[in-house]
Amino acid sequence: MPLFKFVLHVLVIALFFSCEHSEIDHVQEVNIPAGSGSGQSDLMVSRNGDLFLSWIQTDSLNMSKLYISQYEKGQWLSPVLIAKGNNWFVNWADFPSIENWGDKNLTAHYLQKSGSDTYAYDVKLCVSTDYGKTWGNSFSPHNDGTLTEHGFVSKVGVSDSTYRVAWLDGRQFAYAEKDSGFQKQMSLRSAVFGDFDTPILEDLIDNRVCDCCQTALTMTQDGPLIVYRNRTEDEIRDIYFSRYVENEWSDPQPVYNDNWKIHGCPVNGPAVQSKGENVAVAWFAMNGEFPEVKLSFLNNSGMSFNDPIAMDYTYPSGRIDLAWIDEKDLIVSWMDQMDTNSTVVLQKASLDGSKGPLHTITITSAERSTGFPRMTIYDDMIWLTWTEIANTSHVKVVKFPLDKVD
């Protein structure tokens, strides 16, 4: 182990145990209806201010079931089955999520195998128009018909009657087998849907992107904005963004030029959230041998992002999320390394560049199957969920008082 990394590990262990009781004592574990064998969880607060949890439950016969439960009056309601199948692609990094659009409309997605190749799978969407009580049949946002990878989905409500879906799309790998005019590379595509399973509009955002980093959509005051990890011909894989303006996507631009050159996907996408007129992006990058977690705000012109703020990481592994507290303050969460384990940490940051203290929420496994901790703010508490690795893995949900992050 390099000397600098050893020193960092010693420091983080000492810092953690020096503040363990002052922080962990405030972390409250939440009883949830997800049982043994559950994983790939997500939290979502609707436009009406209601909290939802979704997760996949997989049994010994490889039957996967996607569930949703609403938190009401201090307890979770009985889980509702969204969809099930024994031919799903269930993955630690490419996980389902729920999105709200309109008053009582919800959209969920999962991934279903389309062929024998490991990465031949399609995106499947399901819609509920009664706030998650019942769900319609699944359908796909793409109709290319290729047995290639389609995944890393993000969704956002556009209006009371429409929502937008974006995904990484591998159809060009199949096209290149028959036409030399195509390159074998992933593209980023999106589609707008209404009440039915036929897209109102499908469009291409970027024809060359990183293969397996999460995408993130947000609805700004000026329309949808997407962030994702790009891939240049020179294998620079920085975070880019595009805005949907006047019925078309703007030319993709870097959020910031990290100039991270890597010959392979780091499986570490960005997070984006908007609040009022403000938009924030958080992401993971490497600066030589040093990993970094950064945060940037969209500037007043709306055409670029400001220079980034470095969060107070030690040796982060990324897996980032963020949530606005109000129109000037937000919370960023990520995973940091601690010897052979990892910690889930969070930190408050503000538009003026100031930051609060770093808070350690838990020590957890460094295994990939821990997944990507998801975070939201509800009822003056910060809620987080991830997959706890034990004799039998299971979804875990905790909450942390919002007034403790100052």
Image (tube, rainbow, N blue to C red):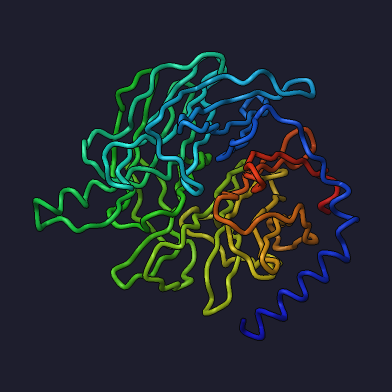
Residue at left offset 49%, top offset 66%: 256
Q: Is residue 325 left or right of residue 87?
A: right
Q: How many marks?
A: 0
| Residue 182 horizontal/vertical position (percent) | 16, 55
Q: Residue at x 40, y 54 (%)?
A: 212
Question: Residue 301: horizontal and vertical position, in percent?
Answer: 50, 55
Residue at x 53%, y 39% (from the top left corner): 221
Residue 109, percent from left and from top: 45, 32
The spot of residue 295 in percent (x, y) is: 61, 60
In which image quadrant can residue 277 be found? top right
Is the residue 203 above or below the residue 24 in the image? above
Quadrant (top left/top right/bottom left/bottom right) for the N terminus: bottom right
Q: Nearer the viewer, residue 226 or 397?
A: 397
Place residue 276 in its image quadrant: top right
Side (left or right) of 399 relative to 157: right
Q: Quadrant of the C terminus?
A: bottom right
In the image, is 24 to the left or to the right of 2? right
Q: Report whether 258 appears left or right of 293.
A: left
Q: Nearer the viewer, residue 173 or 253?
A: 173
Instruction: Write the residue at 46% across / 50% down.
Output: 214
